[in-house]
Image (cartoon, helix red, strand yellow):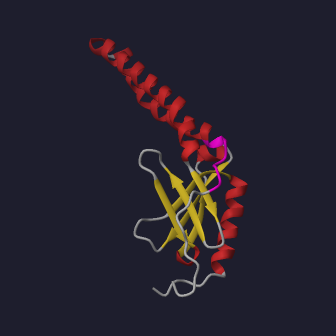
Amino acid sequence: MRGESAVRLRPPRNTLDERAVAWWRAQWLLTAAVPAVVLAVLGVFLEPARSWLLGAAVAVAALGAGCAAFFPRWWFRVHRWEVTEEAVYVRTGFFWQEWRIAPMSRIQTVDTVRGPLEQAFRLSTVTVTTASAKGAVTIAGLDHRLAADLAERLTLITRGTQGDAT
């Protein structure tokens, strides 16, 4: 690699903010609550289908609550990230693991996003856009201050890094 040190695939060291678990739980519960409420309201007003609709509402609510109890903690255990002087490393997934490396020389933009629910939990998502066809590398579930510092750090590092000529 023309005298450069190779960027190697390795497990990233950092975990997400612990509040990401509650954020993911809230997402699951809200996602399940909307159809459950719609089904329940329809069940109240449509007597011929009442038992079917109310049963479906209970099933959707139970499934959402079960997913909210299980998946966020699991995701927290498997999501990792790290930024070095050479690259941004991200690992997600359990059954289908995805390991992404964004070399500093390939980074084009760094963005932070804070949706309304993320703001409620004081979290942010950092998106690192590269020249890769695979798309951007995202680190969701970071403390909002850490995300801002990380975006600033990445901007400073990439400013001093020469782009690939390949």
Q: Residue at x 47, y 45 (%)?
A: 94
Tell me if residue 118 comes above or below residue 164 in the rendering. above
Q: Which residues are magenta?
A: 13-20
Residue 60 location (% of width, % of height): 41, 25
Tell me if residue 156 comes above or below residue 91 in the rendering. below
Which sits in the foreground, 46 or 102?
102
Q: Residue at x 58, y 66 (%)?
A: 88
Tell me if residue 165 comes above or below residue 142 in the rendering. below
Which sits in the foreground, 111 or 16?
16
Say whether residue 113 is left or right of residue 37: right
Q: How many marks?
A: 0
Q: Residue at x 42, y 44 (%)?
A: 95
Q: Hey, which quadrant is residue 110 in on the image?
A: bottom right
Q: Hey, which quadrant is residue 107 in on the image?
A: bottom right
> Mostly what secondary structure, the magenta segment?
loop
Q: Which quadrant would the C terminus be assigned to in this image?
A: bottom left
Residue 15 part of the magenta-drawn span: yes
Q: Hey, which quadrant is residue 51 in on the image?
A: top left
Residue 69 location (% of width, % of height): 54, 29
Tell me if residue 22 comes above or below residue 89 in the rendering. above
Say whether residue 150 is left or right of residue 76: right
Residue 50 part of the magenta-drawn span: no
Residue 48 location (% of width, % of height): 26, 12
Residue 40 location (% of width, % of height): 41, 20
Q: Residue at x 46, y 55 (%)?
A: 98
Say whether residue 146 is left or right of residue 30: right
